[in-house]
Amino acid sequence: MRSSIASAMQRFRPGIAPTLVVLVLLPLMVGLGFWQLSRGHEKQLLVDRYAERRAAEPVSSAQLNDMADPAFRRVHLRGQLDGEHSVLLDNRMRDGKAGVELLQPFHDQASGLWLLLNRGWLPWPDRRIAPAFTTPEQTLNLDAWVYVAPGETFQLHADPAAAQWPRLLTALHPQALWAELERRGFAFELRAEAGPATYETQWPVVAMGPEKHLGYAVQWFAMALALLGVRPRWDTGSERVSGVEIITTCRADKQYATILTDNMIGAGVHINAIGGDCPGKTELHKDIVARASMFLEYPAQTRIEGEIQKLPQDHAVTELWQVMTGAAQGRRDSAEITLFDSVGFAIEDFSALRYVHGLLAEAPFYQTLDMLADPDDPRDLFGMVARARPEVAA
């Protein structure tokens, strides 16, 4: 009986492999925690700078090219939009809905500079239908602010070059656009403030706020503390099964394996051997199989695929259905070693499923789920899910 704390402490032996794992993971987790704190500090500085510059008065567009750090600067613009060269920035999510951001070249009259103006977010629930938008033709007066991306957008593959307009892109490169159009343009995107020529313009400053980085840092430090609290030990197989009454083995290796030897199994143990399911794939030593009382699902198949394939074809067994119907006895005494040699049968699984289904049909404790997808376009599974949302369907 393992109930003495003192004896447990005496048996404690730090294993080499677990100790090495702790020595590797502990500094890694602590390092990741401090990295998240550093990222959170950087994001906080970014948010503070955004708030400071957004509160300032707009500058003129003529000053933009002379600024060493134009990020988040407010700019007053007067000019016209070029609706013939519209860009739709794909994979933009708002409140769990898919959509695009509409960007168009804007010619500023005061500076003569071309600017890539982001007019806001548009929903795109059905990708079979192009997003609808309009472009004002009159001269516009509006305010915007400079957005400088923190890095390159990750792309599985590059956007196609010289695609038709409006152009669907996954990453934005204003300089490449100006070179293609042969225009003198500003190097960064401008995001319009809310006005008559805009769509949804609630721009997030950062994708992940500083508070989330703090939360992740706490998680990494907590995991490091938890790792310190774990007492690593390297048990032998005998120690793991000592004193237990039920053992279940389930391995995937297709080989004659021996994960339990005869000396590990004491009187009164029951074994569920469920890993063997083909010839040449076993888990138990032959002596365990020979001295245990065998219970099988279907002997004709189990003698080929189960643990009993190691024994002669006439070795005595009891079929599981005989025990369940009372035609045969199960465990005869407390010292008997019993072995359920299971190889798995679909008819068994189906019968159990039907039985449970029949019981649930008479009770309110279930919910019917539609598990079969039937999209209009097999390449657009996201659009199918989006259209299934109640607010989209409405």
Image (cartoon, helix red, strand yellow):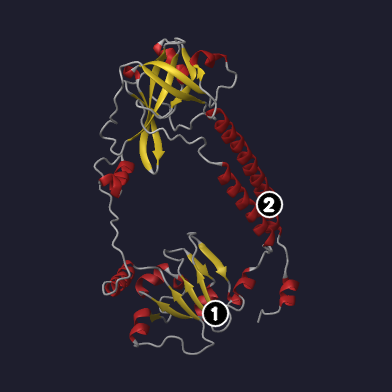
**What SS does tag 1 mark?**
loop
Q: Mark 2 and mark 1 in contact? Answer it, CB < 8 Å.
A: no
The front one of 241 and 181 is 181
Residue that carries the numbered disc 2 in the rendered image:
26
| Label 2 Cα neighbours within 10 Å, binned few <14 / some 14-19 / many ≥20 | some
Q: Quadrant of residue 109?
A: top left
13 displayed left or right of 109: right
Q: Can you give x and y, in whole percent of width and height, for residue 52 in the image?
A: 57, 30
The Cα–Cα distance between marks 2 and 1, rounded to whole angstroms, is 36 Å
- First in sequence, mark 2 or 1: give its number: 2
Q: Can you give x and y, in whole percent of width and height, for residue 319 in the image?
A: 37, 80
330 displayed left or right of 372: right
Label placed on residue 192: none
Q: Name above or below for residue 372 compared with residue 36.
A: below
| Label 1 Cα neighbours within 10 Å, binned few <14 / some 14-19 / many ≥20 | some
**Which residue type does callout 2 highlight?**
Leu
Q: Name above or below for residue 60 compared with residue 315.
A: above
The front one of 9 and 196 is 196
Q: Can you give x and y, in whole percent of width and height, for residue 85 in the image?
A: 34, 18
Q: Residue at x 30, y 64 (%)?
A: 367
**Which residue type does callout 1 highlight?**
Glu
Q: Residue at x 30, y 17 (%)?
A: 137
Q: Name above or below for residue 174 compared with residue 327.
A: above
**What SS does tag 2 mark?**
helix
Label placed on residue 245: 1
